[in-house]
């Protein structure tokens, strides 16, 4: 049975470190790594609002380009991370995607869609004893349909 490992990325070093751990896990299980980058749905919705309220004054094609740009920028981040990982894991099957929404919601939904075995996230933004888990990891831990692996991504 092939393991499906899912990780979320942005352009940060901590996201890359978590993705490296996800690739290591996927390779060790002979699995498939899915890299997903979330982009702000609020920004996309705001552009839609501008489109509907100012249709006569704003070029619809320009708004389409802006909306598509959100997805493309996110897709480019995921592709860049995949390219780095392919250098270290040339035999690993890596799939990439960009999805509008909050990082936690996107990863939860993607895990359901893929029937993922594990979601890998970093410990970015986890600070102090009062925050055992960061907000993304906390939400995923309570709602994910699979296991959650929190990679140590910050230096001690």
Image (cartoon, grey):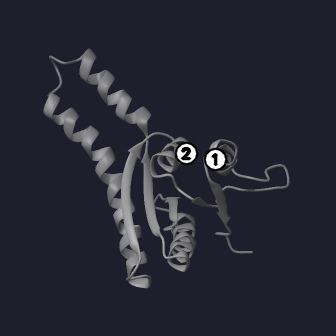
Looking at the rendered structure, the secondary structure element under dot 1 is helix
Crowd tier of the residue under label 2, counting other residues whose Cα lies within 10 Å: few below 14, some 14–19, many 20 or above: many
Residue 41 is situated, as x and y percent measured from the top left of the image, at 42, 36
Give the side of residue 94 with respect to residue 62, left or right: right
Nearer to us in this view, 43 or 85: 85
Residue 32 is situated, as x and y percent measured from the top left of the image, at 44, 68
Crowd tier of the residue under label 1, counting other residues whose Cα lies within 10 Å: few below 14, some 14–19, many 20 or above: many
Q: The C terminus lies in which quarter of the figure?
A: bottom right
Q: Residue at x 48, y 71 (%)?
A: 31
Residue at the right extreme? 129
Whether label 2 touches label 1, CB < 8 Å:
yes
Lower sequence index among marks 2 and 1: 2
Residue 121 is situated, as x and y percent measured from the top left of the image, at 60, 59
Q: CA distance from mark 2 to mark 1?
A: 6 Å
Q: Residue at x 14, y 33 (%)?
A: 61
- Residue 59 found in image quarter: top left
Residue 126 is situated, as x and y percent measured from the top left of the image, at 72, 56
Q: Residue at x 37, y 54 (%)?
A: 97
Nearer to us in this view, 155 or 80: 80
Give the side of residue 78 with respect to residue 8, left or right: left
Q: Residue at x 79, y 50 (%)?
A: 131
Q: Which residue is mark 2?
A: 108
Q: Which mark is residue 140?
A: 1
């Amino acid at each position: 049975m092939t393991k499906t490992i899912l990780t979320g990325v942005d352009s940060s070093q901590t996201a890359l470190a978590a993705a490296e751990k996800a690739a290591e896990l996927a390779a060790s299980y002979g699995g498939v790594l899915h890299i997903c980058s979330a982009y702000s749905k609020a920004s996309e919705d705001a552009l839609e609002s501008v489109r509907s309220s100012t249709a006569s004054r704003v070029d619809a094609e320009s708004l389409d380009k802006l909306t598509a740009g959100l997805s493309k920028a996110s897709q480019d981040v995921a592709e860049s991370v995949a390219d780095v990982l392919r250098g270290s894991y040339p035999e690993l099957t890596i799939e990439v995607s960009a999805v509008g929404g909050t990082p936690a919601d996107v990863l939860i939904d993607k895990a359901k869609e893929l029937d993922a075995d594990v979601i890998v996230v970093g410990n970015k933004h986890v600070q102090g004893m009062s925050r055992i888990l960061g907000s993304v990891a906390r939400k995923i831990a309570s709602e994910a349909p699979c296991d959650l692996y929190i990679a140590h991504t910050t230096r001690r």
